[in-house]
Image (cartoon, rainbow, N blue to C red):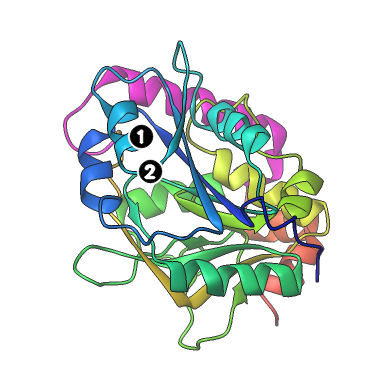
Amino acid sequence: MEGTLPDSSPRRSLITVTFNSREALMRFWRDRDDDAQTEWIVVDNCSSDDSAALAETLGARVIRLPKNVGFSAANNIGLASARGDFIGFVNPDVGIDKATIDRLEGIARETGAVVGPQLLDPDGTIQPNGRGYPLLTAKIRNRLRGDDHRYLLTSDGADPYPVVWLMGAAVFGTRATIDRIGGWDSRFFIYYEDSDIGLRAWQAGVPVLLAPAATATHGWARETSGKFRWMPWLREIASMTKFYSRYPEMIWSHRVASRAHPAITRAVYPG
């Protein structure tokens, strides 16, 4: 069990990165639980709507950035400003309550892991936010079919279970754990940063766990879905290139990735 902060400081910090996120904030954060032990930090990436002003009216401490520095860099800015020793990175389109945060905090402090809640679609169906090896072939197949059980990891039980990485919409850990990993890699403007932080966690000896009994609703509006726009795709391609240059074993096969990461394979794919 890690030490706690003095009573005058919040015990935990939620960090939300916004970019033209007014609608999501109104939908998912307007009725959030007030908790004197939790601070909410919003890092606004130079929104052109009133995301920052709305976040302030909803109770956030807002850091307004003069330009869009990307998801990873903004998360790190929020982390540097956070006063809690339990940290949650939570997207503006995620609705999460105090009971869920309490469960995640207990797991993180007991295990020293990076943890995530089980994300749900707004209609209550399970969103597969626990993922397996981020193989290039698995990502392509997931876009086309979404039926790879070694990539979309789920469990029928209630106990936390290991995954290779968690979708970046909701990622939690103690400050000591996040610092041990090195935070988010700001070289990933957006996309693949969550795959990267999961792999770096395992490389640092930090397990990555998904907690089925802790649930949160996720709106999940992906920029590269729906109407075609060049910029999101260019950013995804740029991040993809950086990611597979760093982890070339993920270009090949599950067997090659398993050999390169035996500790992950033993934990996530026993037998």
Name the residue tied to disc 1. Answer: 56
30 w.r.t. 111: above or below: above
Residue stretch rendered in magenta on the structure = 224-251
Can residue 126 be seen from the camera position used here? yes
Residue type at numbered disc 2: Gly
Position of residue 92 measured from the top left corner of the image (x, y, whole percent): 35, 44
Is 194 placed left or right of 90 in the picture? right
Q: Is residue 45 above or below residue 27?
A: above
Identity of the residue drawn at 33% across and 58% down: 32
Prevailing secondary structure class for the magenta stretch in the rendered image: helix
- Residue at x 69% of width, y 61% of height: 255
Image quadrant for the C terminus? bottom right
Q: Residue 158, how many percent across, how many down? A: 51, 87
Residue in the foreground of this view, choosing between 206 and 97: 97
Q: Position of residue 165 (x, y in %)?
A: 59, 56
Identify the residue under disc 2: 59
**Left or right of 169 in this view: 113:** right
Could one spot residue 166 in this view of the protein?
Answer: no
How busy is the neighbourhood of tag 1: few (under 14 within 10 Å), some, or many (20 plus)? some
Mark 1, secondary structure of its residue: helix
Comparing 60 with 116, the one in front is 60
Q: Position of residue 131 (x, y in %)?
A: 52, 60
The residue that appears at 51% across and 58% down in the rendered structure is 36
Please check the rendered image and state whether residue 199 is part of the magenta-colored stretch, yes or no. no
Q: Residue farthest to the front?
A: 8
Say whether marks 1 and 2 touch (CB < 8 Å).
Answer: yes
Measure the alpha-carbon separation of dots 1 and 2: 5 Å
Element carrying mark 2 = loop
Residue 246 part of the magenta-drawn span: yes
Q: Relative to 135, is 220 on the left or the right?
A: left
Q: Quadrant of the N terminus?
A: bottom right
